[in-house]
Amino acid sequence: MAEFFRFDDLTWPEVADLPRDLPLILPLGTGYPEPVLEKALDYPTHIGLLPAFPFGWPGSELELPAPILAAYIKNLLDSLREDGFSRVYALTPPEIDLGLADSQLRIKPDQGNLALPPQTELNKVILMPIGHTEQHSLHLPLSVDTMIIEAIAKGAVKSAPDIGYTLPVMPYGVSTHREAFAGTMNAGGRAFEDFWLAVVDALVAHGFNRFYLMSGHGGNCSFLVNVVKYAGDRHKRIFCATAWLHTSGPTGVAALEKYRESKIGGMGHACELETSMALALRPDLVHMERVKDDTDFVATPNYYMDWVEGGALVANPPWDDDSVYGAYGAGSLGTAEKGQIWLEAAIAEKVQHIHEIHEQHRLRDARREVGYGNWGNLIA
């Protein structure tokens, strides 16, 4: 029998050490019988399973145009090929054709994967948590961004169940720097924007009108701003918003400043903050004995690194300039106690945002209904 392992449980040096002919599988949804998969792969000794892609195909109910889904998946598989892996596959139900030829395995899953919110949630804010699968230095797994934003989204909905509902977390985003360290995936900026705009389109077609695109990965954020702009222009009766990561508004920043031990530059990536949150959520995946701090960022008054990026300049220099081990910050200062405090602050911050998105939609819709401004001509 093959030994299955979770790709996103690994650190980037562990990915770098994997045999390049080892099969890596990216499944659409879950529930595929392992014996059938082993047979399809001709019984290898090890099989790496990437995080399940949560929706986008007909069987998920939240169906998107096939070319948009295929572009997203193809870019992710290409990330693995760029790292030298020769046996990478999308695993899909038999009726799905992504145009990937021999890179697609078709197996009937034992269970359905339904992601479309029920109609009972129509008047709620639909949260779309988006993490990523990428390197997080020597001591953290590839899944850090996903586990953190999933926990925050679930916590926020638990705190505001009457006005919030969350989609399953998306474990794949955008990393323009992906070649610097092994294991980092990249959906591609344009494919990412097309996909998430199509998600909004599909949900609007089912009657939903309040959306919060929540990112746990910095590389997603600028692209999500574009999605929000496109969505707002295309669907004038919705309210769609995003924000810079989490723990970055007044509530989050106050908690960071109160409890952080690092100076400016100690929080950015695989840092005091993310290490602390990972220790609070999945201590079994954190290897504190391997921590190497990376705090030698090339900083100037208008361009420097910290969790809430500072300065007037926006840039994207190569990671190799600033990071030796794959971090931005002081992971050695992470503790589970601080992680729990900061997770609670992040959830409280997102609950505030959910209430505000809900109220923005209510107030704006009330104006539209009475013909405010140009709306009088549009509804006449």
Image: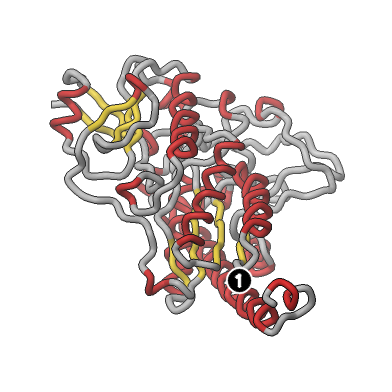
- What amino acid is at disc 1? Ile
Q: Is residue 365 visible?
A: yes
Counting from the top left corner in percent of width and height, residue 43 is at 16, 20
Residue at x-position 63% and y-position 39%: 328
Q: Is residue 185 above or below residue 17?
A: below
- Residue at 60% x, 69% y is 353
Q: Quadrant of the C terminus?
A: bottom right
The residue furthest bottom is: 370
Answer with left or right where residue 223 lies relative to residue 110: right
In the picture, measured across the screen, residue 199 lies left or right of residue 251, that is: left
For label 1, the crowd category at 10 Å Cα-Cα, with few meaning under 14, some 14 to 19 and many 20 or more, is: many
Q: Nearer the viewer, residue 348 or 357?
A: 357
Q: Which residue is situated farthest in the right direction here? A: 301
User: Can you say whether 242 is above or below 355 in the image?
Assistant: above
Q: Where's residue 187, x and y in %?
A: 52, 35
Q: Helix, strand, or loop for circle 1?
A: helix
Question: Residue drawn at (65%, 81%), measured in percent from left and top?
Answer: 369
Residue on which the image places disc 1: 357
Which of 41 and 323 lies nearest the eye of the viewer? Answer: 41
The image quadrant that residue 80 belongs to is top left
Count the numbered circles shown.
1
| Residue 195 located left or right of residue 252 | left
Where does the N terminus fall, quadrant-wise?
A: top left
164 up-or-down from 67: above or below: below
Quarter of image, res 297 = top right
Which percent across, then down, holds residue 70? 44, 34
